[in-house]
Amino acid sequence: MDRSVPDIFSNLDLLDTQIVAAIQISPRASFREIAEALGEPEHTVSRRYRRLRREGLLRVTLALDPRAFGGAIKLVRLRCRPEAADAIALSLARRDDVSWVSIHSAGWEIVFNLRAKTSEDASDLLTRMLPRTPQVLDVRTATVLHQFAGGSPHDWHHWQGTLTASQIQSLAATNLFRQPESPSEGRLPGTEDRAIIEHLTRDGRLPFTTLARNLDTTTGKVTRRVEQLVSSGVAYFDVDVAQAATGGVLAAIWMNVAPAKLDAAGQSLGRNPTVPFAAAISGTWNLSATVMAADHDSFYGFITTTLATIDGITGYEFFALHRRIKNAGALVAGDRLAMPSATPRLDPPDTATTRPIRLSDAVR
């Protein structure tokens, strides 16, 4: 059987790519459900998935949505001395409330998502820790106002072209953990919920029977708590895919768009299969996106064709990704996902996501 993947960026063969696409649609679909949708033996799907995870190519994780606690998602651009970039980026990446940490501009700039649950948590990092770090030259912050792509793993359509409409429909029907568009107001997770979250952050496909055994509780109780966390919008399942799997290169674009054209421009980018993230933001720029391309030369074509056809863009800043340090939940080692620690960390409630970091110590 020909398992090549035509016309998309992928270093995987067709079946591996289909398995990843299936898990993006339904992160906790059983191997049997995926196998039935793809028309493959269950043991083949199981073996392939375990290899993808073992080799650091794919991981399902559970994340908290700060909006459920009155917080917000912020995009932070941090200029620093190049010799300090690695240490600062890694220190940030080790925080539970920080994701998508990247180094750009040949080491001068770090970009990351801050998912602080409260304004106090965000302020502690942005106005106290970072400004007091001598190697940090400048900090600029934008709040995500609306996401057009990247809000959930199934809204990135890049690999769904390897699946038929009936396969997508079949897989979507297995997704019992759908997050709402807007989370309801929640309370900070207690000790029991934090234990569940810690385990599923490391492996979002961990069987509930195993999770219940690890936590000395019942499978039914664990299942109900996860269903409640996700259905209320407090938590959601995300899927990390390593660059070793996707191939290609990445870049960020920060744009100014006329207000009357902002939604249409964002929707256009969000539908593009080479755009895994697009969001309306506050600040100097009002639209931000991440773009994939086969190579750096191909970015020119994206700018002169795709970007040029979007009405309302009055200016933009474009910079290629130099190195990824962390994805949604997984640290990155080279172009693969680093294995999570062997034992989940259970912090006291007041330090669960904002354990203090001494950035200045990290770069001495």
Image (cartoon, rainbow, N blue to C red):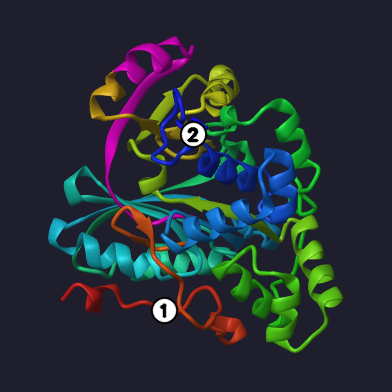
State the extent of the magenta-drawn residues as a range: 301-328
The residue labelled by disc 1 is 356
Secondary element at tag 2: loop
Rendered view: 176 above or below 227: above
Characterize the local packing of mark 1: few (<14), some (14-19) or many (20 or more) Cα atoms within 10 angstroms: few
Task: Name the residue: 70% across, 74% down.
Answer: 189
Where's residue 257, x and y in %? 47, 22
Asked if residue 312 lies in the magenta stretch, the reply is yes
Is residue 330 found left or right of 236 in the rendered image? Answer: left
Quadrant placement of the C terminus: bottom left
Please state which of residues 29 and 267 is positioned toward the viewer in this rendering. Answer: 29
Task: Using the rendered view, name the quadrant where residue 236 is placed.
Answer: bottom right
**Residue 360 visible in the picture:** yes
Where's residue 352, x and y in %? 56, 78
Where's residue 239, x and y in %? 56, 52
Q: Residue furthest left?
A: 83
**Residue 152 visible in the picture:** no
Asked if residue 237 lies in the magenta stretch, the reply is no
Is residue 62 found left or right of 309 in the rendered image? Answer: right
Is residue 34 found left or right of 120 in the rendered image? Answer: right
The residue labelled by disc 2 is 3
Q: Label 1 is placed on what type of residue?
A: Pro
